[in-house]
Image (cartoon, helix red, strand yellow):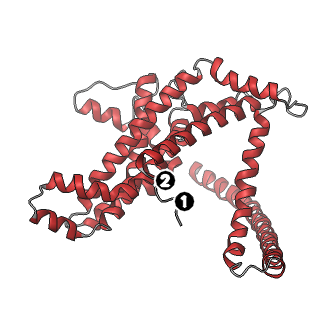
Amino acid sequence: MLMSVRAYRLIKGVSELLPLTWDIVVQGIGEVGKLIFFVAIAVVLLEVVAYLILVKWLKFKNALPFMLMLPALVGVAILILYPFGFNIYLAFSNMSMYRFKEFSVGLKYGISNLLDVFRVPVLQRVTFFQLFLRTFIWTVINVVFHVLGGLILAILLNRPMRGKGIYRTLLVVPWAIPQVIAALAWKCEFHYQYGFVNILLEKLGFKAVQWMSDPFWAFIAVVIVNIWLGIPFMMVTILGGLQSISPDYYDAAQIDGANGWQQFRFITLPLLNPILTPAIILGVIWTFNNFNVIYLVTGGGPMEGTDILVTSLYKAVFEFYRYGFGAAYSLVIFLFLLVFSVIYLRISGGFKGAWEA
């Protein structure tokens, strides 16, 4: 009887909720439709103006490529350049929770914000240099394992074997699962009492680990999760590069007496370099700025022990409401990544031929 009453209440609640949900869906579709319509009209008008200027006024013979690129350039300007410029503007302000509407902008505020990034704790305990060192260690460990794991798996999958398609599909699963779902699932697996990881350790004769209570083990936990999530991307990228290498190179090397290591060193690695260079840069940037894994698995804790630069930036802005400081902090992070990308491209030869016609 009790179960039937509960079932009736559940069905009644769902039936009352469905019309409201449907109204929200219809309203959302209508708003999106209006947005798409206005964007389409704006693109058409933009193309008409570009045609009149480039073809009719300036008499360009090859105006079509510029006309096709123009909407994308305008989109980049609106979605990237404007927010970036506004971020620079906020970096030179004293905007905070207490001065949200009546904040001041000036050079002295910008200099003060930039200096505060390096001289005061970003949150309650950790300083910028501690966070930078932890972020550096986090990035290096993850990217090294991503590249090595992806390379080993790609080489194995590039060989003839039965069930290759099944193995490839299973190995891509971590990449296919939404990162939020994967991170929350792993958080449950690291539970001290009921998590699979500790149960497995105890079955093997080891003691259970306080994954979420000890800063060191919490850091190890988020590293494990991010390695599991990142290897499939590197594997797929490197596998594509391996499949583009002609087998004739290896046949010629075998005729000349080259062993497996020599073939890998002098054929595989050099020919993979154009693939590995952008993949490693993207891997470093994504890992350096990986917010989801740390925030969802540990929340940056315990005792700010797993916070990196990007999670501390989020907390400084949305938990401590230091908007001007946060804008300056984000510029410092951006400059670090920009300098790294330029130096790595220069060392690896990524700029070679970039300015040639």
Instruction: Kindly check if marks 1 and 2 are in contact, taking CB atoms under 8 A apart as contact.
Output: yes
Residue for point 51% across, 53% down: 178
Report if residue 304 is visible in the image: no
Residue for point 74% across, 63% down: 74
* Position of residue 140 in the picture relative to residue 184 (left or right): left
Callout 2 crowding tier (Cα within 10 Å): few <14, some 14–19, many ≥20: few
Q: Mark 2 points at which residue?
A: 351
Say above or below: 29 vs 299.
below
Q: In x, y percent, where is residue 197?
A: 34, 36
Toward the viewer: 246 or 282?
246
Q: In x, y percent, where is residue 163?
A: 24, 66
Q: In the current view of this chain or complex, which residue is farthest to the front?
A: 356
* Position of residue 180 in the picture relative to residue 218 (left or right): right
Q: In x, y percent, where is residue 144?
A: 36, 41
Amino acid identity at mark 1: Trp
Q: In the current view of this chain or complex, which residue is farthest to the right?
A: 102
Circle 2: element type: loop
Circle 1: element type: loop
Assign the C terminus to one quadrant of the image.
Answer: bottom right
Q: Distance between the residues labelled 1 and 2?
A: 8 Å
Residue for point 46% across, 23% down: 215
Toward the viewer: 193 or 296?
296
Amino acid identity at mark 2: Phe
Mark number displayed over residue 86: none
* Position of residue 252 in the picture relative to residue 183 (left or right): left
Report if residue 197 is visible in the image: yes
Say above or below: 229 vs 355.
above
Toward the viewer: 19 or 44?
44
Q: In x, y percent, where is residue 343?
A: 49, 42
Q: Name the residue under label 1.
A: 355
